[in-house]
Every structure is written in structure tokens, then in C-alpha cells.
Image (cartoon, grey):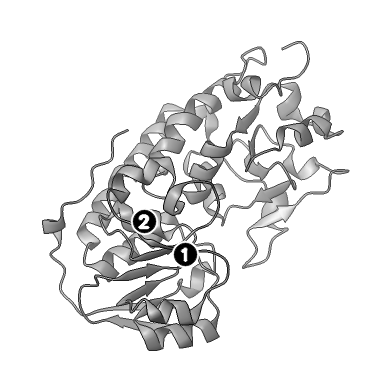
């Protein structure tokens, strides 16, 4: 599905704006032009609003500037400074930003206090914790901070409508159990995580066995390989950051899972896994384009229907 970037002339919001968050309130006095994004996924959201950051914090992957293929067009000719690892206060000060954003950054109170002396700084809201902000709220906050709230709301409405339409077209998904799991360490994401939010937006439910295993600021549960029962779901989505196919093949109890025996396992390759893990306005449509057909194959009620990605990875049960 095509994504249309907002025009530079689209801004109509008045400043200053005030943004409440877990460490207090931030006043953004005027339209920013040098934005430093400390969120591991926040640059995708800024790019969706037509606001390439002056600097960004790269998460993972081999792509230039930490920008994955779905966001390359939005990056255009911009060449942001790339940061990695811990938040470097001195390096950020040298950039002379006029806005610092970090809703998905793990920013501590002390770091916020130091950063806010450099420029207006926006951590996450208290109710969401460090990494639980829904993509809609992340975009809405950045829309307010950059003067693009109207454009943010239009983007949200469009993507939410697509989720609604898919959900309406697949009533058999409503209430079915599903979970996304990092294959390498068997880490299952709960309903407060953006990956859990994604699957529940399609009608599925993350099992309570996963939700109850994580604390407020802990969004996944490590599942011991000797007891896979918490991820014994109807649609099991294996995420892979690279190199986990062999680990799945060696997982001795994997054949005991319903999803394995009934052909309901979905293998997400590196690109699809990254799109789901960013869950940004730029990656969500890509993820839906690829994941929905795989879910349809997994949930059609016929174990003989192969899930294409699982077949391509060589992970189908013997005889499929």
C-alpha cells in the first residue's frame, strides 16, 4: 500500500505546545528544525511526518543511517548523524538540537534532566512505560511536537482503517490465540508490546500466560525450551533477527505445539521481523502486506495448506 508523505506546507499548528510525560511536562516553544531522535524506532515516525531527524539512534540492521527499506523514500537525500549504544549527553549537546525525542529509548530521569538543559526533551508518557507506547500515541505526540498533529491524525486514521477492514474480513481470527516469539531466545511478546498490539489489532489474543509473566516495563517473557506450553497457540509467529532457522530445527519440543502439527507456524524473515518490531507508520503497511496472506494460510482450517514463508525456510513438518 502506497504511503504519501505530507507536504512541507501542511503545518498549521500553533506554538508553543505542552507535552506531559513520565518526568513532568515539556514546552516546545516553536517549530523545531534540528531534531535528535533517541528512540530506537522514532526516526521512522519522524520520517512519516516528513521530518528527517538531524540525528537518530540506530537499533539494528545493515542499512545506511539505520533506515530500513520501507523508509528509504521518506529519508530522501537527508544524511542524519547516526548514534548507537548508550545515550551520549555530550555528543548530543554538540549537535545543538532544538528538540530531543525519546519515547522508545529507555531514557532515565537523570538523562532527561541533563538532556532537557540542552533542548526540550520528550520521554514517554507514564501510563505506557519505557517501551509500551502504542504507535498511534507515539506519532500523535511527535505530530504535536513538530506542528504536524493534523497530518499525524490523518496517517493514524488511514492505518487504523486498514486494520479494521482486515479484521472485518477475517471473523475467524477474532479471539484466536496468537503470539510473536523471537526464535533465538524464545522470547514471547505480551499484549502491551507493539508486536502484541499489532496481532491484537487484527482480532487475535495474546495468551494470559504470556501477559502475566512480564512486569510493567518488561514486554516479553523468556520461555524455557523444556516447557513451551505458554506459546502453544493457534497462530505462532516466529521472529528472526537472522540465523535462527537452525535453532528452530533443533528445538526438541517444537513438534509438540499445535501450531507445528496443524501447519499454523509462521516464519517471519529478518525484514518482516524488523517491520513488525518497528511497527511504525512506514513499516506497518509493509508488515500487513506480507503477514496477512501468511495468517490466511495458517488459519484456513486445512493443515495441508502450506504457509509460504515457513515452507521457504524449510520449517514445515515432515510430510507437508
Is residue 18 in view from this perspective? yes
Q: Earlier in the sequence, mark 1 or mark 2?
A: 1
Q: Nearer the viewer, residue 84 or 292?
A: 84
Q: Percent from the top left, x then y, of residue 122?
A: 40, 75
Q: Residues within 10 Å of mark 1 (few under 14, many from 20)?
A: many
Location of the C terminus (image quadrant)? top right
> Whole-Å distance between the Cαs marked 1 and 2?
10 Å
Q: Which quadrant of the rendered structure holds the N terminus?
A: top left
Q: Is residue 30 left or right of residue 88?
A: left
70 relative to 41, above or below: above
Residue 299 visible at all:
no
| Frontmost residue, 37 versus 265 | 37
Name the residue located 22 percent from the left edge and 55 percent from the top edge: 151
Residue 127 point in image, percent of width and height:
50, 71
> Residue 137, image x and y in percent?
39, 61
* Labels in figure, total: 2
* 203 sits left or right of 152 in the view: right
Q: Where residue 19 sits in the image (x, y, percent)?
A: 34, 77
> Dot 2 corresponds to which residue?
45
Q: Secondary structure at mark 1?
A: loop
| Pointers 1 and 2 in contact (C-beta within 8 Å) | yes
Residue 218's place in the image compared with 31, above or below, is above
Name the residue at 47% across, 87% down: 114
For disc 1, the marked residue is: 39
Amino acid at each position: 500500500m502506497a504511503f504519501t508523505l505530507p507536504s512541507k506546507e501542511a503545518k498549521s499548528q500553533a506554538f508553543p505546545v505542552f507535552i506531559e510525560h513520565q518526568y513532568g511536562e515539556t514546552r516546545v516553544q516553536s517549530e523545531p528544525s534540528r531534531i535528535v531522535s533517541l528512540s530506537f524506532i522514532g526516526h521512522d515516525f519522524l520520517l512519516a511526518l516528513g521530518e528527517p531527524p538531524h540525528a537518530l539512534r540506530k537499533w539494528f540492521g545493515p542499512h545506511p543511517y539505520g533506515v530500513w527499506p520501507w523508509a528509504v523514500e521518506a529519508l530522501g537525500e537527508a544524511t542524519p548523524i547516526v548514534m548507537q549504544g548508550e545515550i551520549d549527553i555530550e555528543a548530543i549537546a554538540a549537535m545543538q538540537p532544538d528538540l530531543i525525542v525519546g519515547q522508545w529509548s529507555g531514557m532515565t530521569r537523570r538523562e532527561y534532566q541533563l538532556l532537557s538543559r540542552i533542548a526540550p526533551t520528550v520521554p514517554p508518557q507514564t501510563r505506557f512505560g519505557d517501551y509500551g507506547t502504542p504507535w498511534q500515541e507515539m506519532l500523535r505526540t511527535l505530530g504535536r511536537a513538530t506542528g504536524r498533529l493534523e497530518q499525524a491524525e490523518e496517517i493514524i486514521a488511514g492505518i487504523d482503517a486498514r486494520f479494521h477492514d482486515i479484521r472485518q474480513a477475517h471473523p475467524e481470527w477474532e479471539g484466536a490465540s496468537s503470539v510473536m516469539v523471537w526464535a533465538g531466545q524464545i522470547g514471547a511478546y505480551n499484549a502491551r508490546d507493539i508486536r502484541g498490539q499489532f496481532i491484537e489489532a487484527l482480532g487475535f489474543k495474546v495468551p494470559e500466560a504470556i501477559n502475566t509473566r512480564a512486569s510493567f516495563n518488561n514486554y516479553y517473557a523468556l520461555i524455557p525450551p523444556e516447557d513451551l506450553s505458554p506459546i502453544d497457540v493457534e497462530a505462532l509467529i516466529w521472529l528472526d533477527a537472522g540465523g535462527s532457522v537452525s535453532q528452530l530445527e533443533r528445538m526438541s519440543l517444537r513438534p509438540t505445539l499445535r501450531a507445528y502439527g496443524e501447519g499454523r507456524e509462521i516464519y517471519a524473515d529478518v525484514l518482516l521481523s524488523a517491520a513488525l518490531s518497528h511497527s511504525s507508520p512506514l513499516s506497518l503497511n509493509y508488515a500487513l502486506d506480507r503477514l496477512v496472506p501468511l495468517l490466511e494460510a495458517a488459519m484456513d482450517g486445512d493443515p495441508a495448506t502450506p504457509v509460504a514463508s515457513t515452507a521457504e525456510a524449510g520449517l514445515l513438518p515432515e510430510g507437508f
